[in-house]
Image (cartoon, rainbow, N blue to C red):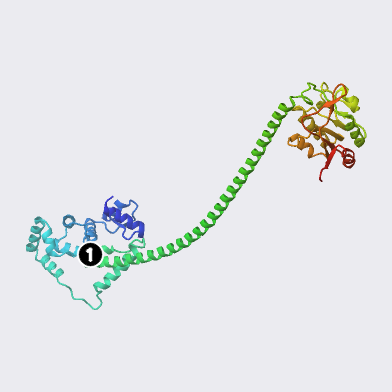
Amino acid sequence: MSNVKYDLKKSKDEIGVLYPRIVDKEDREIDGFHRVSADEDWPTLRLDHIDTDVKYWTARITANTHRRGVSEKERKKDIIELAKSLRAEGHKGSLVNIIARLTTFKVRYLQRLLPIGFKQKEKAVRSGMKADALSASNEQTPKRKSKHETSDKEKLDNLYKKIEKSAFNGQKPTSQSTIEKATTLGLDVTQYKEKLEEIKQALTNSIAKQYSEVKKDLKVAYEKSTAIKKVLTAQIKAEETRIEKSNKDLRESLRDEVTEEVTQQVIERTEKERLEKSSEKNVHVANATGETEWYTPKIYIDAAKKVMGTIDVDPASTEIANKIVNAEKYYSIKDDGRLQKWDGNVWMNPPYSQPLVTEFCNLLVEKIKKGEIKQACVLVNNATETLFYQNMLSCCQAVCFIKGRVKFIDKKGKSTGVPLQGQTILYFGEYEKPFGEIFSEFGRVLYATS
């Protein structure tokens, strides 16, 4: 896009249309070629009263006379076309004078500009037609103004009002074209430019005022949007902080759970390895005698009966062991006491190998919590570091830590089985006080706290 087209397009976008495109009745362009090139939708003003060639070329010359961009070559071309049109319409008299009257150009300038053919024609007209020459002379002689004759300034002001009313308010001219009137009266088009500059300035001031108001409104809107942005930013930051804290708490919680689970697995594995090495999977081990079965001394069974009254079930026993325990029901290794029913009062000396000792002890706690067992006494190693022992401690009402080590009885009835570690008897039931009084002769008794 050329500079002229770019400037016109920019001017239209910024302050609107000041000068419309002007065409005659037949849509021949009088003024506005560059405007339409810059924007196809440029407003067009049609002058229906410009309906002849003479009027068209007169209007075209008048509209472009003082334009900086119009070269003398272009101006000469338009003047020649006007002269041709005057001749074609049969105008008599001096063509130079007629064109000077219509366009405000000086006679000498026109004589220099017109081709020689038109000049010879002019000389023939002057010498052969005295009346026309006298008429032309009279036309050049200024007439005396009467009292009621309107001055050029007044005429110009009236024309300006019509221009403002018709061309710039989108109304059709109600009389002869103001441009043609201006050329007919011989008024200087530069005066129109001054008036049009005033209109342009007024429009510029109006637009500047509107722009100032819009700018003020935009400033208020920007301040409001800035305040909203601050509030939203604060809310987003608070939410991010909350989410980060929540994620941190979740990570710590998961880490604690994983740590606890891993710790428990390590303890269980260590306990299992320790018991496998120490007990060599025997029920009781006593100085490597080779015996695998050892029975509870009768003094502990009698003490348990004093507390509970009777022994209804022994879930881990043998036929020989039950001669001492004398339980109403007992289950041997073939019966697998883990699968049988336990009820009433229970005495249990579980097998000390893993995983049997853990399974029997955990099963007893489960049945106590379900209410299937009324009372129970459990003789077991004092393995306080193990999970199954801690599970029983959390449920029992009292525990007796036996002094020394229990001397278990072998098949021959001799007390020769001394285990590798100490033993405890745990009591489950509502008679913890009698249990403490009776079992205190075997060792220190501790009670559960409420």
Quarter occupied by residue 177: bottom left
Residue at (21, 59) in percent of width and height:
68
Q: How packed is label 1: few (under 14 Cα within 10 Å), some, or many (20 or more)?
A: many
Name the foreground residue: 36 vs 432.
432
Residue at (20, 57) in percent of width and height:
70
Count of numbered tags: 1
Q: Position of residue 118 (x, y in %)?
A: 11, 57
Q: Position of residue 50 (x, y in %)?
A: 27, 58
Side of 133 relative to 385 (left or right):
left
Q: Could one spot residue 305 in this view of the protein?
A: yes
**In the image, is residue 243 above or below residue 415?**
below
Side of 12 relative to 439 (left or right):
left
Residue identified by numbered label 1: 183
Hey, what amino acid is under mark 1?
Thr
Residue lying at the far bottom in this picture: please name it.
147
What is the secondary structure assignment of the residue under circle 1? helix
**In the image, is residue 40 above or below residue 368?**
below
Name the foreground residue: 104 vs 282.
282
Residue at (54, 55) in percent of width and height:
234
Q: Position of residue 230 (x, y in %)?
A: 52, 57
Q: Could one spot residue 33 in this view of the protein?
A: no
Name the foreground residue: 400 vs 315.
400
Side of 125 relative to 422 (left or right):
left
Q: Position of residue 175 (x, y in %)?
A: 31, 64
Quarter occupied by residue 115: bottom left
Name the foreground residue: 37 vs 166.
37
Residue lying at the far left in this picture: please name it.
127
**In the image, is residue 46 above or below residue 163?**
above
